[in-house]
Image (cartoon, helix red, strand yellow):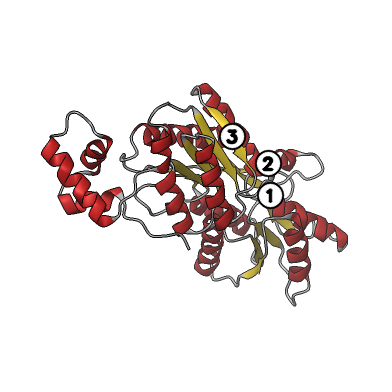
Amino acid sequence: MAEKYATLEDVANVVGMSRAQVSRALRGDLGVKPSTRERVVKAATALGYRPHMAARHLASAQSNTVGLAIGEPMNPYHMQLAQALDAELARAGLDSVVSLRALDDASSLRESDRLISLRAAGVLLISTPHGGKAIAEIARRLPCVYLGSSVDHPDVSTVSADDEAGVRTAMLHLIALGHRRIAHIGGGPEPADAERLQTYLQVMAEAGLTPQVQIGRNDTDSGWRGSHALMRQPEPPTAIFTVNDFVAIGAINGLHALGLRVPDDVSVIGFDDIPAASSEMLSLTTLRQNVVEQARWAVQSLQLRMRDPSAAAMNTVVPVELILRRSVRKLG
């Protein structure tokens, strides 16, 4: 577990000043009275506050390098988002250092130290780490933006898809087409996966329908195994909503292995709209995330925190769009 440190907000609360004022005092801003600076420094020392590690590295030279930490490099959507972020960073005159090692909380913290050693000025976290404490610890070390879900922390800006609205749109579409036995194949520990599952359960409850859920990981194998488990049930589903397109591909492959046809026997909806979803073979109905818009907001939010670590966190939610293809059909 990461060691607990006082935050800039803790110091501000003790001295009765704003976070921005405390930040200026600790930076040695000439506009801050010496007596005020002394009071702030004393409070920070008493609380055990440690300034941004990255700020120490950047005190003598400005860095234009930003880390891109990718939690699931095998997920095509994450690589698609990373590509959009890299392009947006380039437009902003920033360079990127890609990390494929931030697979869990512990490795994400190690990667934050490595990025600091490389003089990174900030980091964009793509659905990693998963735990709120680890995310907060990285935010203490480096200006960061978390992409994938909202995070309730004053120092962590986030950019996420409107998962609730998207899942609700997909589910109501299936219900309107006459489907009543609608299953869900969920993913891993990411907060976005949990939100998609929760919304699925809410819509099923509101419609008076019985949920059928299989939980695995965000990979094709989980989709395959989930589809097989669902089709062995006494009343197998007529439609499956998956946590993402990667899982949907596995589910479709699993259904085909059972001799079932998509959508004639089972309809399938994914989430993300990865490039393969529009292929002639898959023609996957899915929820499209706007990676360009997410990248634009993420880089803007990160630049704001790089300029002023005391700036308030921004939480941006980007709409998703239901893309209709041939993997879903109307019953009857």
Residue placed at 20% from the left, 52% from the top? 13
Along the line of sight, the residue nearer the viewer: 329 or 195: 195
User: What residue is shown with label 1?
Assistant: 245
Res. 146 mark: none
- Reading the chain from its start, which is encountered first: label 3 or label 2? 3
User: What residue is shown with label 2?
Assistant: 274
Above or below, 6 relative to 30: below
Q: Amino acid under label 1?
A: Asp
Along the line of sight, the residue nearer the viewer: 154 or 241: 154
Judged by depth in the image, the label closer to the viewer, 3 or 1, is 3
Question: Which corner quadrant of the image does residue 262 belong to?
Answer: bottom right
Along the line of sight, the residue nearer the viewer: 63 or 212: 63
Residue placed at 46% from the left, 34% from the top? 121
Query: Could you give the CA–CA distance between mark 3 and mark 2, rounded to whole angstroms?
Result: 23 Å
Q: Amino acid under label 2?
A: Ile
* Residue 153 screen position, x and y as percent: 37, 52
Residue placed at 61% from the left, 70% from the top? 211
Above or below, 65 relative to 216: above
Residue placed at 62% from the left, 60% from the top? 188
Question: Which corner quadrant of the image does residue 313 belong to?
Answer: top left
Q: How would you rate the neighbour count of disc 3 (Cα within 10 Å): few for under 14, some for 14-19, many for 20 or more? A: some
User: What residue is shown with label 3?
Assistant: 97
- Reading the chain from its start, which is encountered first: label 2 or label 1? 1
- Reading the chain from its start, which is encountered first: label 3 or label 1? 3
* Residue 315 screen position, x and y as percent: 40, 45
Identify the secondary structure beneath mark 2: loop
Along the line of sight, the residue nearer the viewer: 102 or 237: 102
Do the numbered discs 2 and 1 sit on residues whose CB atoms are within 8 Å? yes
Identify the secondary structure beneath mark 1: helix
Do the numbered discs 3 and 1 sit on residues whose CB atoms are within 8 Å? no
